[in-house]
Image (cartoon, rainbow, N blue to C red):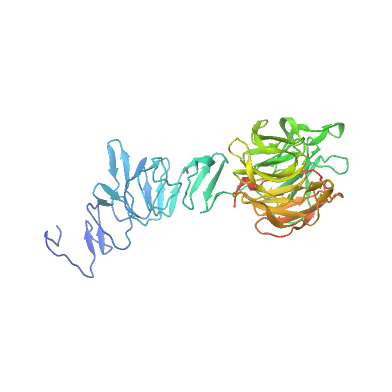
Amino acid sequence: MPNIRVGYSSDFSIKDQKVGIGSENPRALLDVGGSLKGNFNITGVATLTAYGGFVAQNQHINKASTIGFGTVGVGTLTEYYETETGFTNLGGVHHGDDQYYNTLSEDLVIDEGQILNITNTDMVGFTTIGEYDPHSHQSHVCLGALEEVSVTNHFSVPCGGSNDRKDNPIEGTVRFNDDLNTLEFFNGNEWRQFTYSQQSGRGVLMGGNYDTPLGWSMEYVQIPTLGNSQYFGELEWGTYNGASFASATRGLYAGGRGLDTYGSGTASYSTAHVDSITIASRGNSTSWGTMSPGFVHADSCSNSTRGLVTQGYPASTTVYYVTIATEGEYGTFGNLTFGRHSAAGCASPTRGIFSAGSSPAVGNEIDVFTIASLGNAVEFGKLSVSRRAYIGSCSNSVRGIIMGGGVPSPQVVFSDMEYITIATNGNGTDFGDLTLNRQNGTTTATQTRGIYAGGGNPTYHNVIDYISLTSLGNAQDFGDLTVWGERNGGQSVSDSHGGLGGF
């Protein structure tokens, strides 16, 4: 029996005492055991420790449940789970037909083997985990002010291609990108990809020539550090002026001018052969397959799944694509805005850039492709000067750098570099200068540092330069090539280049 009874119109006021409703030993000013129904306004902090009332810290989902969100006010959620006989309230504070989930509990724990479905009809004012679309009825995880979600088995974020991204995502939104095969997040300005744990910042330099011999050997550097190159392995086919591109694990070297067999045979103007290496493991290349009709003075770029390769010499508009993980799989991607060879390629995870080149006149045009969608290039902008045959180019996921190069007749070789912001069409802007005037060197990058190795003017050099991609300035000495001459017309790949994203 209650020891205090209050009538319909009675005043009820207690000062400096704890009150228990359904609780014989109240532990707070108001300690409620069981469920509350009706309209309640709570001032201050209210925490739930169990579904039935104001008791527990962690919220456990211990059966297959559906949480539905109706049209409710800011800071509250309607919570219920679906049973065979309909929807059952989970306890808490009731308001009409809706149930509010007012809690500052830190964890929502989904027990192993259970499924939690989230459905939206019209909801405003909530922090979201995943992409929140108030007009969508798809299953998204929208958990109000919960700070942490603990899942004992499996938790799936929203997924889809690059074209499926929401137009105005909330900062901190996380999703899985099917096109890039990676998790990504929105930082308030742009989508960025999570860095792969196996990325070490290794750059592998391969191919090229020194006077007349071909470069069969490969060497590598750790781009985040300084120092001379080290031996990596041998190419199956030694060529120069081919094309290269990579995922975080596999590097491909396509085409180029070479010999029919190792160390002997008739010179072939262009080869269709494609070498494959595992970037993390030193060793010889293996055959990935062939890409007819072969490529020389081509260029390339890639994201984590797809490489783009220009046809090269003689000047062509055709661009092919390669599925990096699948041996021998390639096709026609689209066309450049005009035919050219010896262009410079770089990429973000979504856009592929090809700058300048010869047609046979030297140009300064910059083209851009959307890597996930087959189709033709559109004009991006222009470099500051018409020039740059045998150009170097590298990028992180934000900024592309066009480096060195020259004009063939009368011959002029440049040391300057320009940069572009890949997400925003526009013209090149001065970045700084290489340590030497050079062309036909080889370039690659991580998210923070780019390198330019070898090349000549006309004397060949074994110097490796490096730049910081995040700030403007001149190149500095990184070290020297030590395995094969100057790699004139060589190629490079990295496990951390701009097309892979990361931060």
The answer to which image quadrant residue 472 occupies is bottom right
Q: Is residue 277 left or right of residue 264?
A: left
> Hey, which residue is sitting farthest bottom in the picture?
16
Residue occupying image coordinates x 88% and y 40%: 212
- Residue 182 visible in this rendered orientation of the protein: yes
When asked about the image quadrant of residue 487, the answer is: top right
Q: Give the side of residue 111 with respect to residue 486, left or right.
A: left
Residue 490 vs residue 114, the one in the foreground: 490
How far from the left and from the top, in percent, is residue 189?
A: 53, 53
The residue under the point 57% across, 40% down is: 181
Farthest top residue in view: 292
In the rendered image, is residue 63 in sight? Answer: no
Work out whether 167 lies above or below 465: above
**Quadrant assignment, res 465:** bottom right
Q: Quadrant of the N terminus?
A: bottom left
Name the one closer to the observer, 431 or 264.
431
Which residue lies at the image location 15% right of the left edge and 59% below the top edge? Answer: 2
Q: Position of residue 462 (x, y in %)?
A: 83, 51
What is the x, y in percent for residue 60? 37, 48
Q: How many marks?
A: 0
Q: Is residue 21 above or below residue 332?
A: below
Residue 188 spot, x, y in % from top left: 51, 54
